Image (cartoon, rainbow, N blue to C red):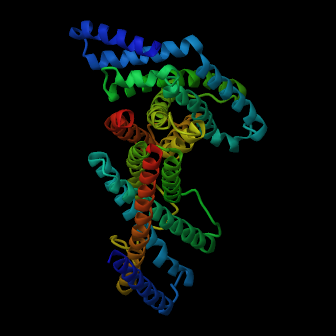
Amino acid sequence: MTAANDVSAGVRKGATAGRRRSSFTRLVFVIMAKDLRAELRTKEAVNASLAFAVVILVLFNFAFDLDDPSTRMIVGGLLWLVFAFAGTLVLNRSFARELPNDCLDALVAAPVSGACLFLGKALASYVLVMAVELVSLPVFGILYNVWFPFGQMVVVLALGTWALTVIGTVFSALTVNIRLREVMLPMLTYPMLVPALMGAMVLTAQLAAGTSIWGDSVTWLKVLTGFDVLYTAAALTLVETVLVG
Amino acid sequence: MRDKILYGMGVVAILLLARDVYKIASFPPEAAQGAIFKIIFFHVPAAWTAMVAAGTALVSSILFLMKKDFKYDAIAVAATEVGLAFLAINLVTGSIWGHVIWGIWWTWDVRLTSALVCWLLYAGYLMLRHAIEEPTQRATFAAVFSIFAFLDVPIVYFSIRLFRTQHPGPVFLSSNGSFPPDWTMVLLWNWIALLMLGIVIMLVRLGHEETQREIDYVRRMAHAL
């Protein structure tokens, strides 16, 4: 019952430290820290995700000739496909990690709101997926000689990864107890993520071509931001129903 | 009584459709596109019917989450299945039109892509339902998923105005529209006919869902004994 103990300890600490910080924020960070600690001790999802990302990046070499200028237009799409596939491996574990020893029941029974639990888990997955992406990005750059302006790329990564994480975490909770969980999660999340992935792909391709994301393609940036805001609000509203019923 | 109303509505819908097909056949071919243009009389009403079905599924899903009444869950699943069928009609008729006019069956235009994504989303809704055994959990998760899926529908509707697209612009209810008034009337009547047909199919499906729930209840009682 490591997860439940961590949360109970966090709740106690949260009660004493409540004067300085709001308990909601504190509890979100407790959940996040618990998930990150559990993952960093085993490294099972991150290692698998990173290895998977590198394997796909190598396989792309046989499918496309990225030295050809005409195929360089698709680098944004390729990169985000890698991120989406590798990210799903991390997100699949978000709630599935709590299944052994009925830790999920203990978490749901803990005195934390569903929104708090969701945000903590989403932020932990966000950190992990971002880490996988930030390692994959230079690997991609070295293998295919494609470079991106760092600041603008971080903006695209931050927005695109949050879309991936927010949808992935909600659906990880939806699919945690059902048959064919590993298949159902990508099948449900990828169609939902299409507008966000389209936006991230277009913006990344623009950056690879040396064009600023603040120019003509700013509409896609708005789509990506709108998507993030809309689905975060929906997730925070509905996650209690998913977890408690 | 309910069956008689259902059959009556079905007969009226089919008669209306037959009348509309006769009228559409009597219209002259469109100047630029020829006879294939007439596919719009089914393509657009099918999309509208699918939108109404998606809206019904959304409202039913919200009502289920608020009241926990399985009647609303049954309406949501029936509406989603009917909407999926009409969206499939929309995609197939659009594809046939595209093959004749554009010379290709499919193009990754924003609106076409959004319609296909919506279809995949609602297909995902049905697959999610099939994967969950426990009725309350199935209804709750499906309702949440339906709300998430519906958030995608406005992107379909407004994308034509937001993005540069290969899809033809709207020709009705638009300032630059060019659809003749008598054609618009036939199109609206055809929509009413398809909508009635959709309602009939939905109510039949609703009956199946209610029967299934009764069977599940009896089965649980038998297990308990």
Q: Say which quarter of the image contains residue B154.
A: bottom left
The residue sitting at 36% across, 41% down in the picture is A230
Image point (35%, 52%), residue name: B70
Point out residue A114 in the picture as x, y percentages from the top left corner.
34, 29
Tell which of A152 and B196 is nearer to you: B196
Query: Outermost residue, front direction?
Result: B225
Residue for point 56% across, 33% down: A88
Q: Is residue B61 left or right of residue A163?
A: left
Q: Residue furthest right?
A: A62
Rendering coords of residue B130 (x, y %): 52, 49
Q: How many marks?
A: 0
Q: Which residue is situated farthest in the left direction here?
A: A19
Please indicate whether residue A89 sits to the left or right of residue B18 in the image: right
The N terminus of chain B appears in which quarter of the rendering? bottom left
Q: Quadrant of residue A115?
A: top left
In the figure, A3 relative to B148: above or below?
above
